[in-house]
Image (spheres, helix red, strand yellow):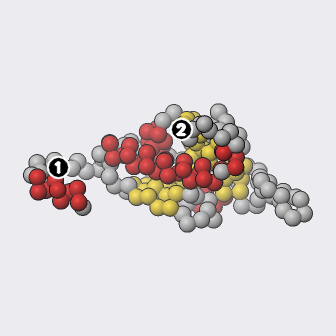
Amino acid sequence: MMDATAHFHHSTLRERIVEHVFVGDTLRSLWRLGIYDVEVLRSEFDAHGYDLVLARGRIVRHIQFKTGSAAKPGSVSIAASLAEKPSGCVIWIKVQADLEMGPFFWFGGEPGEPLPQLDGYANPRRPTRNKEGVRPIRQNHREVPGKQFRQLATLEDVLAALFGPLVPKVALMTLPMDDDDEHHALRG
């Protein structure tokens, strides 16, 4: 039985789970396509507008994750520093009560292109109040309306938005292995 308040009371845990599952599912999907040349880099803290970096060849994606249980995103606060990255993007993930993910919503440029301009969007207010009871303006963030996000139905659609066509860079030769080779391959 699921606790109806868990998503609210444990939102940080939920976001970490979603990020880990996203990375695992991403790597598994790429593996199944024969794509092994992907790097995953994690930010120690969210001071520069991104949670994760995925790189493949010359495409380096700084990704800010957002999650929600609504059918689609409302306004989304995006760190202006994400626009300074070479190919930043935001992925808003709809999360079900049981943490199933999808659909996904995308805000970003083509692979290798920067984040769309944020200058025309208003500054949001901080979600929490300060000691004076005021929600101050977040000068280094922009509030992007949910309608600016493009819906992507599957993780494969997200991967294509991140990296373009998903084609292995090098076809690996398949050589027959004897029992000894297989044993060494399994042990590393």
Amino acid, disc 1? Met
Q: Nearer the viewer, residue 99 or 54?
A: 99
Q: Nearer the viewer, residue 37 or 42?
A: 42
Q: Quadrant of the C terminus?
A: bottom left
Amino acid, disc 2? Glu
Asked where in the image residue 84 lies, by quadrant, the reply is bottom right
Q: Is residue 112 visible?
A: no
Image spot of residue 57 (x, y percent): 37, 56
For numbered disc 1, what is the local secondary structure?
loop
Image spot of residue 50 (x, y percent): 58, 58
Image spot of residue 116 (x, y percent): 60, 49
Disc number for residue 163: none
Q: How many marks?
A: 2
> Considering only order in the chain, which callout, 2 or 1, is on the residue closer to the N terminus?
2
Q: Which residue is mark 1?
A: 173
Look at 23% across and 48% down and name the residue there: 171
Disc number for residue 100: 2
Which residue occupies the extreme front position in the image? 1
Look at 66% across and 41% down and name the residue there: 3
Image spot of residue 143 (x, y percent): 72, 49
For numbered disc 2, what is the local secondary structure?
loop
Q: Nearer the viewer, residue 140 or 99?
A: 99
* Lateral position of residue 54 relative to residue 166, left or right: right
Look at 55% across and 60% down and name the residue there: 85
Q: Is residue 102 visible?
A: yes
Q: Residues within 10 Å of mark 1 (few under 14, many from 20)?
A: few
